[in-house]
Image (cartoon, grey):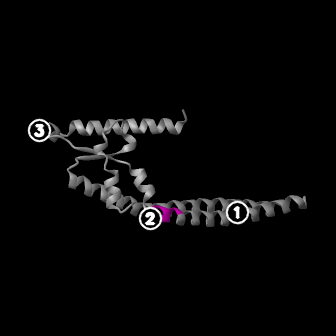
Amino acid sequence: MSPIKELQTISRRILMAIALCMLLSTSSAFAAGAAQKIGVVDYGKIFQQMPETKAAEQSLQAAKTQTSNELNKLSSALQSAAQAYQKAGKQNPVKEKELRAQDESLRKTAAEKQGLLIKKEQELITPIRLKIDNAIESIAKKEGFNMIFDKAVRYYGEAEYDITFKVMDQLNIK
C-alpha cells in the first residue's frame, strides 16, 4: 500500500476514534436517555458540484498557466546564457557568478510564485467551504442532528442519515 493511502487509512481511523470518544464522552448522551442524532454528508461531492468550484478551478488553472509560462521564460533565458557560456569555452568567474545569481533568482521567483498560487487557492476555496459549512449547519440544526460527519470517515451508516442531497438542495446544486 502506498504511503499516502496508509496515511489516509490511519487518518480515517483516528477521526473515527475521536468521533467515538466525543460521542461517548458527551454527558447528554447518557443523561435522561437522550438519544444522539448523527448524520453524514458527502462533502467532496457537494464541493465538486458547486458552480463556484468550477469557476475557482478555472481561475486557478489560468494563474498556474501564467506562472508556468513566466517561469519557463526565465528558465529558457538561464539555459541560453549557460549554453552560451559553455560554447565560449573560457573560464570567467564573473560570468559564472552571474549565472549562479540568475539561477538563484529563478529559484526564488519560483518559490514566491508557488506561495502566491497557494494563497490564491485558499482565497478561492475558503468562501466555498464556508458556504457549504453554513448549509450543513443550517440543516443539522433544523433537523435536530447533534453531529455530522463526512462520509469518507464512516464505516457504516444508514442512508436516512445522509444529508448530502438536502445540503445540495439548499445550495441549489442540481
Q: Residue at x 59, y 59 (%)?
A: 111
Distance in Å between CA atoms under marks 2 and 1: 30 Å
User: Which type of secondary structure does the marked residue at label 2 adopt?
Assistant: helix
Cβ–Cβ under 8 Å for marks 2 and 3: no
Q: Are marks 2 and 1 in contact (CB under 8 Å)?
A: no
Q: What separation in Å lies between label 1 and label 3 (alpha carbons)?
A: 64 Å
Residue occupied by mark 3:
31
Task: Look at the image and say whether residue 55 sits in the magenta stretch.
Answer: yes
Residue 117: % across, % down: 54, 62
Query: What's drawn in magenta, residue-wise?
Result: 53-57
What amino acid does circle 3 point to? Ala
Instruction: Identify the residue under disc 1.
Output: 72
The vertical placement of 110 against 33, above or below, is below
Is residue 123 depicted above or below 158 in this figure?
A: below
Q: Nearer the viewer, mark 2 or mark 1?
A: 2
**Residue 22 position in % (x across, y down):** 25, 40
Residue 116 showing in the rendered view:
no
Principal SS element in the magenta part?
Answer: helix
Tell whether 93 sits left or right of 64: right
**Secondary structure found at label 1:** helix
